[in-house]
Amino acid sequence: MSVSDETTRLATASTPDGASDAPAGLERELEDAFEATVAGEGRVEPRDWMPEGYRKTLIRQIAQHAHSEIIGMQPEGNWILRAPSLRRKAILLAKVQDEAGHGLYLYSATETLGVDRAELTEKLIDSKQKYSSIFNYPTLTFADIGVIGWLVDGAAICNQVPLCRSSYGPYARAMVRICKEESFHQRQGFELLMTLMAGTEAQREMVQDAVDRWWWPSLMMFGPADGDSPNTRQSMAWRIKRHTNDELRQRFVDMTVPQAAALGVTLPDPELRWNDERQAHDFGDIDWTEFTAVVKGAGPCNAQRLAHRRAAHEGGQWVRDAASAYAAKQARREAGEQVA
Amino acid sequence: MSMSDDTTAHVEGDPATDLGTGTPQATWPLYEVFVRGKRGLNHVHVGSLHAPDDRMALHNARNLYTRRNEGVSIWVVRADAITASSPEEKDPFFAPSGDKVYRHPTFYSIPDDVPHL
Amino acid sequence: MNAVDTEDNVYDALAAADHDGRWAHGAGFDETVVEVTAPAPEGVDVGDLATYCLMLADDALVASHRLSEWATHAPELEEEVALANIALDLLGQARVLLSRAGHLGAAARFRTPTTATQLADEDVLAYFRDDRFFRNVTLAETDLGDFGRTTAWMLVYSSWRLALMTRLRGSADPVLAAVAAKAVPELSYQREYAAGWLLRLGDGTELSHARAQAGLEDVWPFVEELFLTHPVEARLVAAGVAVDPAALRADVDSDLAQVLPAATLTRPERPAVGLVGGRGGRDGVHTEALGRVLAVMQSLARAHPDATW
């Protein structure tokens, strides 16, 4: 350690290392090298020079992804204590635990870009950073657990598999691990739904009701239509995103329709049909008014989810403080100091 | 090594009297995690985590990155104890080659002779 | 690409050995639970053995439920992962033991004409038994309160169950011996986690010290019951099947004597909770807390007795 990091830590937190400080000619050269790396499908690594916009976009995207994993624990956590069989309880507990793990991998990737997890958590609970709107819907029955696995995790996989090739190395590597685990999640969701569909009349009704409630929000998970997604073009040029929102949404619909048929559920869209010409499914218009409202905080559970996360985080402060204080005392003891 | 005096940098004020009273919040330091998946392989960097001290870091690493597979060997090291090479010879910020692994704020131990910082 | 490949390989090496094994015990698609169908050892009363399995199962099932209450509420994300691990371990232990009890005939009386015939024994016993038929010690059902109380609770619970399972590895019943062999490393992990945190809370800040001590005081009245020998246990001890709880006191005391002073905590001096007419958790006479735990746990399953999930 050349210098104590306390002061520089504070300084760099507010003035992150940026391209603007470099001499103009050098910056040009660095930028060319960066563009060449990205265009050549190379990986950008944490200590490489990168444009400030790239760094900011990545932080926004990865943090939002991490927050989604953590907030996403809540709707499923809602059913852990009431899971109707011990096997389902174990699966659900393990799944919610996986989500905490995924959140941690992603926060870890975000931290390589010069932000601190504590700072990201503050931004989440202060509503300064977003998470996926899907988690602002309530889980009203146990069938919702299956539908979240099938549709929500299915949509997430469509979004995430291409990100395993994201230009930013730590993000891509985190996504490789996450995608492996997500495929288990989707599989268990589908298996639960198949069991329920083969069960009692009440269980089948429960599944259809859950599908009716989650279908449209699942389609919204891919974000605004391409025409209304201002960041997409730059993100694709930087290989942060690999496909447009509408491309991914279409892929999800095409993948899901035959699965719905196999399950015997109806997707709640009268306009949904195969288009032979396009070799893809046509589907109805998404209610973007609802989407916008939920993104802006007016969904059924926005306030509840954030209050819950805030309570856990702030309620845990004394525990985290205790561990830090103990570590400091131990360090002083090892250094031979007297500690009260 | 990881218990150098900068441990206290993450605990603002005197921990014995200051904490738990709503005063500035301490953050657990960042650790990098290296895992040897099986015998015959090298340890490979798999990610990072936060922990208050080395022991908890190891414990958390086992939970998070190996799912408690007991046969796996894990190294944890405080991120601020790692010295890394600079990717570019002409990197303007890390003139004396050899610095921290990531752009994490706590990696910035900037030598005194670097201008305008 | 190299970096990605390397990462892949590391992860593959970790995951390859047990494909579905990364899921919780018994939660994978290829169930690999301990075989529960072995006959009871010769000369052992089957009813006693089934009851003993229920005792050990309920200790784990109810404690697992309490720990699961922490999900999404933990003081840090790393603790979410750790607490879920522990809850999953206990749930896994409970499932095998309930299945064993079911195999020995304990589930039949809880099946009714309305319960689905294909319902697994473990689920019949977990979801369709009233609190009066639960055999867990009352420590397992107490409210875990804040993280201070949870940590104190966990140290006592894991120290006790570890001492029990360590001895049970030598049981004459092969299923109990197998369950115990699997449980020992799980409970060692749990005890290490609890001790590590109690140390940090006790010797952390003034506030955390106070909360850890208060948590210990709250838990203390439930400790004495852990060492009472129930007649079923006494008979099975004689048959070489069960562990005598009275013999576990020294181990638990030794663990506490090691951890509490290091954590600057004081061993409480509070009286044990009284039994009801000489009967406690092992007899199905519980605290009020268990009824509430089960009301939550069993609600959905009981709303659809004819369903399987």
Image (tube, rainbow, N blue to C red):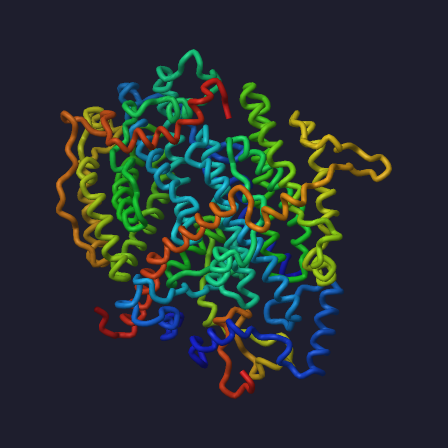
Q: Report the quarter where the N terminus of chain A lies.
A: bottom left
- Could one spot residue B34 in this view of the protein? no
Identify the residue at image location x=61%, y=53%.
A175
Q: In this picture, is C257 found above or below B30? A: above
Q: In which quarter of the image is the C terminus of chain A?
A: bottom left
Q: Which of C97 and C9 is in front in this view?
A: C97
**Residue C5 at x, y = what percent?**
64, 57
- Residue closest to the eye, B60 or A158: A158
Which residue extends farthest right? A277
Q: In which quarter of the image is residue C245?
A: top left
> What is the x, y in percent for residue C185?
36, 44
Residue C243 lies left or right of residue C84; in this view the side is: left
Horizontally, is A88 left or right of A314 in the view? right
Drawn side of residue C54 relative to residue C251, left or right: right
Q: In this view, does C297 lie above or below C223?
A: above
Residue at image position (37%, 43%) is: C186
Which x, y percent locates residue A18? 61, 75
Asked whether residue C122 appears in the rendered view, the answer is yes
The image position of residue B44, as x and y in percent, is 54, 61
Circle count: 0
In this rendering, position of residue A300 left or right of residue A274: left
The answer to whether C7 is drawn above or below residue C124 in the figure is below
